Amino acid sequence: MKLKLSTALAGATLMLAAGSASAQEIRVMCGADGNGCEIWEDILTGFEEENPGVDIVMDVVPYNAILENLPVQLAAGTGPDIAGVTDLGGLNEYYLDLTPYVDADYWNNSFGDFLNWYRAGPDDTGIYGLHTQLTITGAYINRTLFDQAGVAVPAADADWDTWAAATREVAEKTGVEYPMAMDRSGHRIAGPAISYGAQYFDENGDPILVDDAFEAYVAKFVGWHEDGTMAREVWAGQGGNSYQDASKEFINGELVYYYAGSWQVGRFDEEIGDFFDWQVVGSPCGVGGCTGMPGGSGLVGFKQTKHPEMVAKALDFLARELNYTEMTARTRNIPAHLGVAESGVDYVDASDTAAAALNAWGAQLPKISPIAFAYQGHPQNRAMFNITVQRVTQAIVGELPLEDAMNRAKDDLAAVLAETK
Amino acid sequence: MLSVLSSIMRIVEIPMLFLQHKLGINRLAWVFLAPNLILFGVFTFLPIFISAVYALTGGDKILLEDRPFVGMQNFRTLGDCGNFLDPDTCRSDFFWRAVWNTVWFVILQVGFMVGLSLLTALILNQKIRARGFFRAVFFFPVLLSPVVVALIWKWVLQKHGVLNAVLEGVGLEGHSWMLDSTWAFGWSVFLSVWAHMGFYTLILLSGLQAIPRDVYEAALMDRASPWRTFRRITMPLLAPTMLVVLVLALIKGVQTFDEVFAFTGGGPGSATTLIVQYIYQTGFAGAPRLFGLASAASMMLAFVLIVLTALQMRANRRSFNG
């Protein structure tokens, strides 16, 4: 009996040892805020087949864990091999440079400026991330309400004042509660501010956040909250830097014009159905153009991985045009891969409305201002988004006069830059 | 069975006798205290010490070795104020808004909490019908998770919520309760009192039941009025329990975070941002994560809590000594 037991134990130990010697386990931390995780996992099974002995393990975690726990894990050296991140430049110090393992020309030609978002600065030429989800901020309208009210939808080059007047008229004629709403986010308000001339950076490329144009747009924005044009619940109903959207109000048909972004297409398609007609109208125009903010998320590998080559190969596998196209079509995203964008994506499972919306968002891409691209790629952009949200909210609820709130925003930014230099 | 137990006890006794022989009877106490001390040390005292060290460092790095030593700079940043009563004159205006919100919150919450708990305890101490049922009803909110409490009241108070529906149903006008700073703060106090009142009611009820009946009987024979009985008998004899309730409520009030954060998110603006939320946002939910500043604010909060705890211990001693 004793002999049998020891033989079994020895056998099991040998099997475990052999297994651990041949298998390369790649752990991917993935935020559960869409269908991306399951689709990546599905496509990566092809990678596992190409590379016997490699095991991709998808750790699906709440999105907040990516924001709050991942940086701590990375600092402690206990992070995953790959993660899906949204703080693209903020975690740069931990990124694995894929350049030695991939065809750099292919990546540079395919992803162009999107690679900059993952870099430490203008002098950094490394390849760190695969931008999997390109998003663009902009507006949706409830087309049915416009038709019912008999109000013409403003032209593509209409400014915010024109949209505000039109949506107020629609709301008044249809008895709908809210003419307009914008997500409570510093990222969301940035596109309109840039359209109205905000620069965000000085001539040296250092962040300034508040300038005359920014303040002028915020004054307009605060005014719309006072006169009832903007749904007050979204910005004034929260404190701190908490995110708040107005998607429920839009889905329930209580909102005429909703400034959010391309990531809502899937949800609207699913939840609105044929309840009413909705469409993408992009971003209103101003002296600085008609820009939204680009953004999204990407997959990055980390230096601390024990399998850097396999991590790079896995990301390279997803970056292949065929795989990237499949990933984009199934997740219903706008492609950041220039080749895929040029060829067009056939969103096979999407309804006509959703496909039209996704194409409309794709058409917004050329309108994006270089300032918006630079802002999205700046390592301190999250700090700037938070400062914007907190100080603009104070002006909306009357806690601080607008001028004081803007001066405070400048001081906050100076403090952040001093703390992180 | 008994013999098995006594055999086990005899086995346990051997190392104890050995330790007693080696250490002496007084030092043996430390052996029994050690498990608890280790747990407290690792999970309470060590984090406090680490937090104190972080409070003296700056930057946004997580690991201590990457953080520059800045001395008292974080405390100076928090204390840089033209007028402490006016947060707008302070460099860290959100910190001082949170401090003053917390002060007002504690004053109102503790005041209402103690007053209403006493009133409820007095009523529940009477021989009323369905007394057991009412005792359970008042205690029930204590069992709820703070997030559930917040969501229930959010549902009641939102623009298209239950309260406005009721008001509109009786011909009155609804109100945007959560968008009005004063109302949002008032409802946060109410929600907190509603959620915790049952616990303090229970303590006061046990205090009331500990008062000997014969004292009341003597007062009745002396034809003392109910008010006089309450003032001259109930209150003095309940005073030690009241003091414990007061100090406990104060400590819990200063530490309030979860239910108010889930209820209002600290808004509108910063109208309901309390000190613990400020610490959480500065250290964890903000960008960059300013652990040094958050730790400095934690140290200041810890000082206040230590003072309140000392008061509670003193109250407990007085209560124990009669």
Image: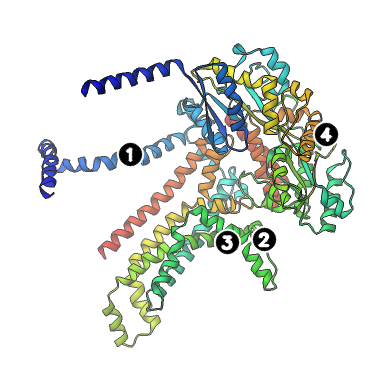
- Cα separation, mark 3 vs mark 4, equals 44 Å
Question: Answer yes or no: do the residues labelled 1 and 3 have beta carbons within 8 Å?
Answer: no
Q: Residue B146, percent across and down?
A: 49, 54
Q: Quadrant of residue A109?
A: top right
The lab-note entry on whether marks 2 and 4 share a chain reads: no
Residue B160 disc label:
2
* Mark 1 element type: helix
User: Which residue is tagged 4?
Assistant: A288
User: Which residue is tagged 3?
Assistant: B186
Judge by depth and name the residue closer to the eye, A339 or A189: A339
- Cα separation, mark 4 vs mark 1, equals 59 Å
Please state if B144 lies on the left or on the right of A85 as rendered.
left
Q: Chain of mark 4?
A: A
The lab-note entry on whether marks 1 and 3 share a chain reads: yes
How many other residues sit within 10 Å of disc 2, few (<14), some (14-19) or many (≥20)? few
Q: Quadrant of residue B47?
A: top left
How many other residues sit within 10 Å of disc 4, few (<14), some (14-19) or many (≥20)? some
Q: Quadrant of the C terminus of chain A?
A: top right
- Cα separation, mark 1 vs mark 3, equals 39 Å
Amino acid carrying label 3: it is: Gly
Q: Residue B167, percent across and down?
A: 66, 69
Earlier residue among tags 3 and 2: 2
Please state if B44 lies on the left or on the right of A332 as rendered.
left
Q: How many discs appear?
A: 4
Circle nearer the viewer, 3 or 2: 2
